[in-house]
Image: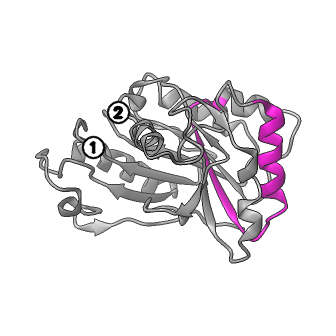
Amino acid sequence: MAGKSQIEWTEMTWNPVTGCTKVSPGCKFCYAETLAKRLKAMGAHGYDNGFEVSLLPERLDQPRNRKTPTIWFVNSMSDLFHEKVPFAFVEQVMATITETPQHIYQILTKRPKRMAKFFVNRSVPDNAWLGVTVEDQKYGVPRIQPLREVDAKVRFLSVEPLLEDVGKLDLSGIHWVIVGGESGAQARPMKPAWARQVRDQCAKDNVAFFFKQWGAHGDDGKRRAKSANGRELDGITHDAMPIIG
């Protein structure tokens, strides 16, 4: 399924793989799992197995059919580097990316060691941005080092859902940081101080900073409609993107 995205930092989603499994606290209330179950109930193609990992080779050509330069979020409904996705299939995904240089592809994973293993003897396409989720100190922060070891033109962190103070981050070799709170009926609140700390580190280290959303709770910790929370942090909308070149 390729389609226009409501995710603030991308334009379209491309899902040649669907389904995943939980690996850390950030996965607890996974939006993709909830959506996959809904799509299965609707009989949507690609979700016959619900949230079981499924390869969809018929979707590999979708970006090739779009000539307009587009920013694609790869596998918004999965993790390209899940253990059940064979490297042979990942190679096919990379072939599509390489053969469509007019597009930019954002690949986000919670499995950076497997991503690093894939790229040991392979080059990262110039138009592929590689990122990891950093939701807490125990599981998220250690993902940064394996990402840093991969020779990508753009490396980014998705600090979402931000579940705690992640402490001082080593942002060397990181080009972009996204911060956001959690959405959904069971969302956990994000404290403003946690977001400010990441923002201030990015400013100090000259790293592009993007504040995605407060999520289901506002900056006062109270639950409210997402639309009421907005994207402002201390009255400012932070929407910087990485500088390429």
Q: In this view, does 41 lie to the left or right of 222?
A: right
Q: Name the residue under label 1.
A: 184
Q: In this view, does 7 lie to the left or right of 176?
A: left
Q: Does the magenta stretch include residue 94?
A: yes
Residue type pointed to by label 2: Phe
Q: Where is residue 42 in the image (x, y as percent from the top left)?
A: 44, 46
Q: Residue 5 carries which label?
A: none
Q: Do the residues labelled 1 and 2 touch (CB within 8 Å)?
A: yes
Q: Is residue 101 magenta?
A: yes
What residue do we see at 77% from left, 48% from top?
93
Q: In this view, does 73 lie above or below 26?
A: below
Say how many tags the image has. 2
**Is residue 163 at least partly visible in the picture?**
yes
- Name which quarter of the figure residue 235 lies in: bottom left
Q: Mark 2 points at which residue?
A: 29
Q: Is residue 234 above or below residue 46?
A: below
Q: In this view, does 239 lie to the left or right of 48?
A: left
Distance from the alpha carbon under mark 1 to that under mark 2 = 8 Å
Residue type pointed to by label 1: Gly
- Name which quarter of the figure residue 176 lies in: bottom right
What is the secondary structure assignment of the residue under circle 2?
loop
In primary-sequence order, the first of circles 1 and 2 is 2
What residue do we see at 27% from left, 50% from top?
215
Q: Position of residue 154 (x, y in %)?
A: 66, 54
Compare residues 69 and 63 and report the one nearer the observer: 63
What is the secondary structure assignment of the residue under circle 1?
loop
**Is residue 136 at least partly visible in the picture?**
no
Quadrant location of the C terminus? bottom right
Q: What stretch is highlighted in magenta?
A: 86-112
Compare residues 41 and 30 and report the one nearer the observer: 41
